[in-house]
Image (cartoon, coloured by chain):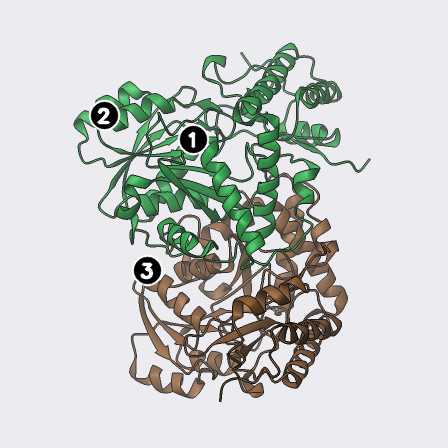
Chain colours: A green, B brown
Amino acid sequence: MDRDKILLTPGPLTTTLRTKLAMLKDWGSWDADFNAVTASVRKSLLKIIHAAESHVVVPLQGSGTFSVEAAVATVVPHSGHVLVLDNGAYCKRAARLTTLMGRRCTLMPFDEAQPVSAQALDDKLRTESTVTHVILIHCETGAGVLNPLQAIADVCERHRKGLIVDAMSSFGALPIDARTTRFDALVAASGKCLEGVPGMGFVFIRKAILEACAGQSQSLAMDLYDQYIYMEKTTQWRFTPPTHVVVALHEAIAQFEAEGGQPARLARYTRNYETLARGMSVLGFRPFLDPSVQAPIIVTFHAPGDPKYDFKTFYAAARARGFILYPGKLTTAETFRVGCIGAIGPDEMEQAVHAIALTLQDMGIASAAPAA
Amino acid sequence: MDRDKILLTPGPLTTTLRTKLAMLKDWGSWDADFNAVTASVRKSLLKIIHAAESHVVVPLQGSGTFSVEAAVATVVPHSGHVLVLDNGAYCKRAARLTTLMGRRCTLMPFDEAQPVSAQALDDKLRTESTVTHVILIHCETGAGVLNPLQAIADVCERHRKGLIVDAMSSFGALPIDARTTRFDALVAASGKCLEGVPGMGFVFIRKAILEACAGQSQSLAMDLYDQYIYMEKTTQWRFTPPTHVVVALHEAIAQFEAEGGQPARLARYTRNYETLARGMSVLGFRPFLDPSVQAPIIVTFHAPGDPKYDFKTFYAAARARGFILYPGKLTTAETFRVGCIGAIGPDEMEQAVHAIALTLQDMGIASAAPAA
């Protein structure tokens, strides 16, 4: 039957009906009612990571990648040198956008099955003295690894380097505390763990560096300093905001707070992850990552070794049973991914595992164990 | 009572309930169902301006300004020289984003109460031989002027200059025909005359120049060539699309087509404009523009000369009666603006005029005539 499918994807993800219902109204982008929504969203975002004292938060139209690019363009001077700690696809994307905009950029490669190393960064910064900024992806969803934000931030602080954190897939679920973790910019988006709909990002910028950001961006649309100044002066967005997306995020945040904020969200996602991991293991699936480095956000599984397996058939059959899986993003191994985030709980995860079990049966695959 | 207000604003604007209801579902951005929606939207957009033979269309996340910036970044080489035909605020914005990204840019000033002149452009291009591209705002909503697209396009073609058209506020309402009007890029957005919700733009790029655009953008997020190539290869967006906005646009386009396409939309907006102009004139309001150069999109009125008038009170009182007006954007005269676009008809315009009449009464203003 035509029921809404459950998205086991890392954003866009399944949102509540209440969040979507908030979009059934049109808002004037100049009107005080809408500006109050923007102000409330910004205040709530600062509260989530205890950043009201130390940072401002600037919303931006577009996908999360737009906000990452805007953060680099706004925070890093033209003469800057960015070091990207690379353990996955999103790290490489951050390096690419940095290089394209004309900032000097160095990739520091790590194993994509492992967190990046604060010790290695410390060593690197002793010799690479021209580096001005470090980019870290908090949760690298290419494989699903949780990177050590606190340790990296400490090394950057000790070496007096700016730190830009892509917290796209962790914000709202994993603990981040701006009072004890020092960063110049931190980026996330509406359609991830806050469970809003996609269409806007937001960037926290440290107040102490804000004035130095004036005039650094070579992009008008992505100039977060300009956006910030205009918003403070007028309470409005500089250019047409995605009004319905903003209002949906406002509603999603209200539910986030009612659920118990970040700790409650992490607890739910952890239960989702554990339910998934346990169930998939019974079917013979092997996760790509060691559980000790796995964030409870998205899990990469090795493809079954059975020659009857192919991803397209597997995806289509799970989809027909109501669950949308996600392809792998690794170059080294055949994998697929299952998200644990969104407005879903352990019940949905149990049903997802059950649908996957039936899918394997249909495909005549007795065990999902990967090739030896 | 708490009823939805009518937005007399140039986007975001009032959309139909059917358009908003399309957002009550979550979509996987990798899923074939969603990709079919994107493909259908792109096909419909090409049809609206008869561009399927000559152009491709590339959707982009963010507000319309993001798409204008992306068009310039993608189409104009680093060594290019852009001439902006300036008769309003949006022209100046286009010049600013062009200059910021490091392209040479010259502003050619015109009276903001008049269309730009094709003859003057022709003269200019005879002497300014380094110009490679011209930017034209089709309908400059700063004042509401309709600029002569066909005549400008003819001059550009004759001089072999690229033409970039910002058709943000005209696309879907005013006639544009890519078969007879030559342009390198034309930009519009979801939340304007197609009556979708805001959150994405789209850019038509002439096929003949497409390959030359490869690698020109210094922005990854705004590289329309890269977005195009990826979309053709995978049917997907490069970065997370604003799924709900895309689906709402799809639904809005279905209604646009059912209404009778661009001619029917223009006819409705023209009736809206005429109803507004007639009613406001009875109240003593004077339009800023001569009717012969006025687009039926947004009308600028002089503020009443009565000393009891102030915009804030006027706005709040009209708002309390259910109508959201729009502030003026001119530096030379005190004005306000009233949009004629969105899912509204002459009945709503008559009610708007009536609400404005009652508002003037409340403010003790006998005539809305401007100061002499």
Q: In the rendered structure, which amino acid carries the disc numbered 3?
A: Leu
Disc 1 marks which residue? Answer: A50
Give the spatial CA distance, label 2 vs label 1. Answer: 22 Å
In which chain is the residue bearing label 1?
A: A
Asked if residue B254 is positioned above or below residue A295 in the image, the reply reads: below
Whether residues under marks 1 and 3 lie with C-beta atoms below 8 angstroms apart, the answer is no
Cα–Cα gap, marks 1 and 3:
34 Å
Q: Which part of the image, by quadrant, shows the N terminus of chain B?
A: bottom right
Disc 3: CA contacts within 10 A as few (<14), some (14-19) or many (>=20): some
Label 2 sits on residue: A158
Q: Position of residue B152 (x, y in %)?
A: 47, 80
- Dots 2 and 3 on the same chain: no
Q: The disc numbered 2 marks a residue on which chain? A: A
Residue type at the position of mark 2: Arg
Residue found at x 68% / y 47%: B23
Q: Nearer the viewer, residue B236 or B24?
A: B24
- Relative image position of residue A281 (x, y in whole percent): 61, 12
SS at mark 3? Answer: helix
Q: Nearer the viewer, residue B229 or B194?
A: B194
Which is closer to the viewer, label 2 or label 3?
2
Residue B13 point in image, percent of width and height: 62, 62
Determine the CA span between mark 2 and mark 3: 34 Å
